[in-house]
């Protein structure tokens, strides 16, 4: 991992990407349903029982993307050097039959990080992205592109504006599109849960932090005014919170996306307010905790099923040193207009490597 | 039914001599469309539903419920009313708005049975999710408008078949004597069919080509007091009006089967059909193939046909009866006699499950195709020479093994390549469970796929639910690149299984285990930064196992709801379920909360039908019969039982308070009664 040492000066711009050409299946089923296992079709299905996690779609697509990239680039590297030492034994077959986690750390089957990751502008991309493959099948105007940006709890509030720009840029670059149709922002600490719709709405009123959210919204407004997002929207705003919010914004949200267990129980005051203000209430089933603590460390770590980017202090294996702080997650979906077909869906997640001591 | 041209229809002996010409011209017309439309691109996802009604006369005071034969008068009344859209039927929402007020008025069409009406929306549906919510109100609007143009004692009902069609005595209004020259049926009069020359000719020429009447035999349901062996007591062995009256004396009516002898017993059935417009030829072919294996599952799930000719049948669906009712195969084609004048043996009726797949999908393994598919090799060669690919040429060369049944003399004078009449003549009398429809001659609409197996449901809520479900599953198929392929002959087997009583509860169907791409789509390719030996070549092709390992038997519950919900089978792998897949799709697109809620209700109905929590119409109808005080446990569905059953069906179809008063409705609809 020597060649990556200079990245210890990682900045906040650190990003690692994951993109899916095919729409992975959705995640957030209720925990009682084992079919959480169906998330992300094909090789990233985890057959192991009990592997349920509420945000399987994101973590699975990241994980399978890592594994696939390691295999692909290792093979390229092997072909390049006419040297079979780097070839990953059996891993390709493992991915093909649905057990995409056969990277054998003990046998050292994992290719070196520099083979399958890339550094651009001070950010490490895991895996590396072949931007020449970016873009949609038809011209961008044929699509409804929706982007949802999750600001995470561990992110410094002051950096939200910068992150929003970076996240949207990544998506636009990946889809090779000049703008997205809808950009939704999701703030941490907000939910729409309660025993009944009234209670959910009442609880919601005191959640989050109005000032911080307004500050971030100003940055989202700028992206809208710059023509990068045709419409902008919020997630999980109840009646009171939305009402307060509307009084203080320059550009009003076109959309409020809410996740309620039974979408037939939308609080009537919220329905009324949304109708009066011409705000579309959209349903979603994203997890409130899209990237739980420790997930990234596990995904990138040296352990079984990890990508081996991070160092293992106990065994003394190489890799990046320090603590990984997730900053944001962005989900994008491109749906073909007039045909209702999801052509492209994927995620990017951003994290910051904080050096120890 | 297609367009109804007028002209001189040829009787079979004459039509037979022109069959080759119609086929030859039909192929020329097909190639003309093919060359014009094969490059058609980016057509929007449009779709349409077709709902069919039986028209009955019913009043509380009248002991009999009858089929009304006033189709022509009702259609005339509808046609003369220019203001259908503003009829008093338009639903008004609590806020005073009329969501359908600006929609073009629905369209009503004649059908084969003179007691039937078909209706379609005034314009095709799009894929805006909010628009999906208009389907049910629009269906209700259509029912209401139809009712408004009938006599006060006439009602449009959505039962698949009339329980006492062909029973002794009076069952139509007005009533006519049986044993007419066209149908020669001893159970139904010629007047049962739409009098337009196309329909009696169709029936007569099928009979004539076949050399005897059609034989529609359905196993009778054996109840406690059903005599056994059971001999259909309504069969008349002493009729000597037509040569075909010998059929029953020659064994046409075997023991333990309800015997029927006319096209009306099949083509008089109502169904729910959905047509989708694809973005292009390839997507159409993909949808055709992927929806094919779903056909039998949706047939079983919509089962609604437990009664024929006044007797409880031992099957739950209409399909095979229609198949037999239009089976024009000669004894030679049937394999009963050695081939002399017929060209080949043909294993299936013109009305049957699909016999081949048509996509050039790389996932379509040769093993999925039927090696014994009958095709006309000369026609296939003409299509290949005309530039069509092998697989689609095979499909049409299979459809074109059939003779045209109804030929109008006037159409044989000049070949008009700006029309598709000869092509459609063969195409539209191949009633397979899917239909692949090329654009019309003017190329104004796209390639379309019709999904045909579903039975009509008693309420518009159910009909809308199944329609919307099919729309959503096609979107999930295309979005997730789902793969439902199993060998086509297994689809045939499933079609048979779907006939069994309560197949939804008790039977298992062949279904593909893994719907997802075996390997993810190649991410890389040989991009600028990739060295020679691009990434796509870096991994070996995934090993392909035996075809038999790709599918297994599953219950409808497992297929629709997934093994996690259904409980699964011991030692079997997990299956996600079609409804969870649809939900995953909905989770990935922008849907407003109100729409999502309504869509959830539709999915919930289908979920509960598949799990058995709610009953199929067939099961519900059986219960209505079984619990009727008049029922003697002898399989006989009397006039009085029929009247009470139809009375319930009318009330349920009307919805609201009328429906809530119907005892036992919760088995069918649970809390969905509205």
Image: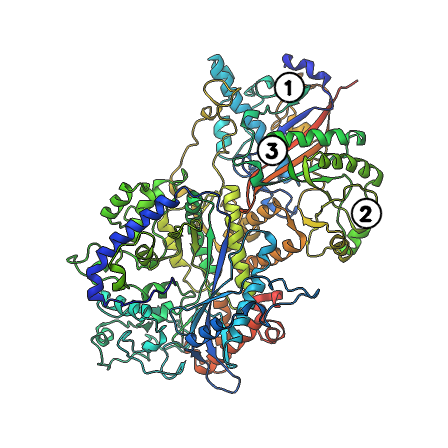
Residue B460 image position (x, y, % from top left): 54, 66
- Quadrant of the drawing holding the C terminus of chain A: top right
Whether label 1 touches label 3, CB < 8 Å: no
**Residue at position x 23%, y 68% in the image:** B11
**Circle 1: element type:** strand
Front position in the image: A278 or B522: A278
Q: Which mark is residue A241?
A: 2
Sequence-first disc among 2 and 1:
1
* Real-space CA distance between mark 2 and mark 1, rounded to the nearest whole angstrom: 41 Å
Asked which quadrant contains residue B16, the reply is bottom left
**Circle 3: element type:** loop
The furthest residue to the left: B340
* Real-space CA distance between mark 1 and mark 3, rounded to the nearest whole angstrom: 23 Å
Residue where numbered disc 3 is placed: A177
Pointer 3 indicates a residue of which chain? A
Side (left or right) of A150 relative to A357: left
- Quadrant of the drawing holding the N terminus of chain A: top right
* Real-space CA distance between mark 3 and mark 2, rounded to the nearest whole angstrom: 33 Å
> Same chain for marks 2 and 1?
yes
Above or below: residue B168 compared with residue B436: below
Q: Which mark is residue A119?
A: 1
**Residue at position x 39%, y 51% in the image:** B442
Of badges 1 and 3, nearer the viewer stands: 3
Q: Label 2: how many residues lie within 10 Å, few (<14), some (14-19) or many (20+)?
A: some
Sequence-first disc among 1 and 3:
1
Pointer 1 indicates a residue of which chain? A
Front position in the image: B11 or A286: B11
Asked whether residue B408 is in view, the answer is yes
Residue B646 image position (x, y, % from top left): 49, 76
Residue A323 image position (x, y, % from top left): 74, 24
């Amino acid at each position: 991992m020597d060649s990556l040492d200079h990245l210890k000066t990682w900045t906040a711009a650190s990003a690692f990407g994951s993109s899916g050409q095919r729409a992975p299946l959705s995640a957030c089923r209720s925990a009682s349903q084992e079919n959480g296992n169906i998330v992300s079709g094909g090789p990233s299905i985890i057959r192991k029982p009990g592997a349920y996690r509420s945000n399987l779609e994101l973590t699975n697509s990241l994980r399978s993307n890592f594994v696939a990239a390691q295999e692909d680039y290792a093979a390229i590297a092997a072909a390049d050097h006419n040297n079979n030492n780097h070839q990953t034994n059996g891993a390709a077959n493992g991915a093909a039959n649905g057990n995409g986690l056969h990277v054998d750390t003990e046998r050292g089957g994992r290719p070196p990080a520099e083979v399958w990751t890339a550094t651009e502008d001070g950010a490490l991309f895991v895996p590396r992205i072949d931007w020449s493959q970016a873009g949609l099948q038809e011209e961008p105007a044929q699509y409804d592109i929706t982007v949802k940006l999750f600001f995470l709890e561990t992110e410094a509030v002051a950096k939200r504006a910068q992150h929003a720009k970076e996240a949207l840029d990544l998506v636009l670059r990946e889809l090779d599109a000049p703008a997205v149709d809808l950009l939704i922002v999701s703030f941490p600490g907000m939910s729409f849960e309660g025993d009944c719709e009234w209670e959910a709405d009442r609880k919601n009123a005191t959640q989050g932090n109005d000032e911080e959210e307004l500050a971030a919204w100003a940055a989202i407004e700028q992206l809208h005014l710059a023509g990068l997002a045709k419409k902008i929207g919020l997630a999980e705003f109840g009646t009171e919170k939305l009402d307060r919010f509307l009084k203080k914004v320059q550009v009003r949200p076109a959309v409020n996306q809410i996740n309620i267990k039974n979408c037939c129980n939308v609080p009537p005051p919220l329905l009324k307010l949304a109708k009066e203000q011409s705000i579309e209430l959209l349903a979603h089933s994203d997890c409130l905790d899209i990237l739980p603590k420790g997930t990234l460390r596990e995904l990138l770590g040296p352990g079984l099923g990890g990508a081996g980017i991070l160092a293992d202090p106990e065994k003394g294996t190489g890799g990046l040193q320090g603590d990984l702080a997730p900053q944001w997650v962005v989900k994008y979906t491109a749906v073909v207009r007039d045909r209702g077909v999801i052509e492209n869906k994927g995620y990017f997640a951003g994290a910051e490597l904080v050096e120890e001591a | 039914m297609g367009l109804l041209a007028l002209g001189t229809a040829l009787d079979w002996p004459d039509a037979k001599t022109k069959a080759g010409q119609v086929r030859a011209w039909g192929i020329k017309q097909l190639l003309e469309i093919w060359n014009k439309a094969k490059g058609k691109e980016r057509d929007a996802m449009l779709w349409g539903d077709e709902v069919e009604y039986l028209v009955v006369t019913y009043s509380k005071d009248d002991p009999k419920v009858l089929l009304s034969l006033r189709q022509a008068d009702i259609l005339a009344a509808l046609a003369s009313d220019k203001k259908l859209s503003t009829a008093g039927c338009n639903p008004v929402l609590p806020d005073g708005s009329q969501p359908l007020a600006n929609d073009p008025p629905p369209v009503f069409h004649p059908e084969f049975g003179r007691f039937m009406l078909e209706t379609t929306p005034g314009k095709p549906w799009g894929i805006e999710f909010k628009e999906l919510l208009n389907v049910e109100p629009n269906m209700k609007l259509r029912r209401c408008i139809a009712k408004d143009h009938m006599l006060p004692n006439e009602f449009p009902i959505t039962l698949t078949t009339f329980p006492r069609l062909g029973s002794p005595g009076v069952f139509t209004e007005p009533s006519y004597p049986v044993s007419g020259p066209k149908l020669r049926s001893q159970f139904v009069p010629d007047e049962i069919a739409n009098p337009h020359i196309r329909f009696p000719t169709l029936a007569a020429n099928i009979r004539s080509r076949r050399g005897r009447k059609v034989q529609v035999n359905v196993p009778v349901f054996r109840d406690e007091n059903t005599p056994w062996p059971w001999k259909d007591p309504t069969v008349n062995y002493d009729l000597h009006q037509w040569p075909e009256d010998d059929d029953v004396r020659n064994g046409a009516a075997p023991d333990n089967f309800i015997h029927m002898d006319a096209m009306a017993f099949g083509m008089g059935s109502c169904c729910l059909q959905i047509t989708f417009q694809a973005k292009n030829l390839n997507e159409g072919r993909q949808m055709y193939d992927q929806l094919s294996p779903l056909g039998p599952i949706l047939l079983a799930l919509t089962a609604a046909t437990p009664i024929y000719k006044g007797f409880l049948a031992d099957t739950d669906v209409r399909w095979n009866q229609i198949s037999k009712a239009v089976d024009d195969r000669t004894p030679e084609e049937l394999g009963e006699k050695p081939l002399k004048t017929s060209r080949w043996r043909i294993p299936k009726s013109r009305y049957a499950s699909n016999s081949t797949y048509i996509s050039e999908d790389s996932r379509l393994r040769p093993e999925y195709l039927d090696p014994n598919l009958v095709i006309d090799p000369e026609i296939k060669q003409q299509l290949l020479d005309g530039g069509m690919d092998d697989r689609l040429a095979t499909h049409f060369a299979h459809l074109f093994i059939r003779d045209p049944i109804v030929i109008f003399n006037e159409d044989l004078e000049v070949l008009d390549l700006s029309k598709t009449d000869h092509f459609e003549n063969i195409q539209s009398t191949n009633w397979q469970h899917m239909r692949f429809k090329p654009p019309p001659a003017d190329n104004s609409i796209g390639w379309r796929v019709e999904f045909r197996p579903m039975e009509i449901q008693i309420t518009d809520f159910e009909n809308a639910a199944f329609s919307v479900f099919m729309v959503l599953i096609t979107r999930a198929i295309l979005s997730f690149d789902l793969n439902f392929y199993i060998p086509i002959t297994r689809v045939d087997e499933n079609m048979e299984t779907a006939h069994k009583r309560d197949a939804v509860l008790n039977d298992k169907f062949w279904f593909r285990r893994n719907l997802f791409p075996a390997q993810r789509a190649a991410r890389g390719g040989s991009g600028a930064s990739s060295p020679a030996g691009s990434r796509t070549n870096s991994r070996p092709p995934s090993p392909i196992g035996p075809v038999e390992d790709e599918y297994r038997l599953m219950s409808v519950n497992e297929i629709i709801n997934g093994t996690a919900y259904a409980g699964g089978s011991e030692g079997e792998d997990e299956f996600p379920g079609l409804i969870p897949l649809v939900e995953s799709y909905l989770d990935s697109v922008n849907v407003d909360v109100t729409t999502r809620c309504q869509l959830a209700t539709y999915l919930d109905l289908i979920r509960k039908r598949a799990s058995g929590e709610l009953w199929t119409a067939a099961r519900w109808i059986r219960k209505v019969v079984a619990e009727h005080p008049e029922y003697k446990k002898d399989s006989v569905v009397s006039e009085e039982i029929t009247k009470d059953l139809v009375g319930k069906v009318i009330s349920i179809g009307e919805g609201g308070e009328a429906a809530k008063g119907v005892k036992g409705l919760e088995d069918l609809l649970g809390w969905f009664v509205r």
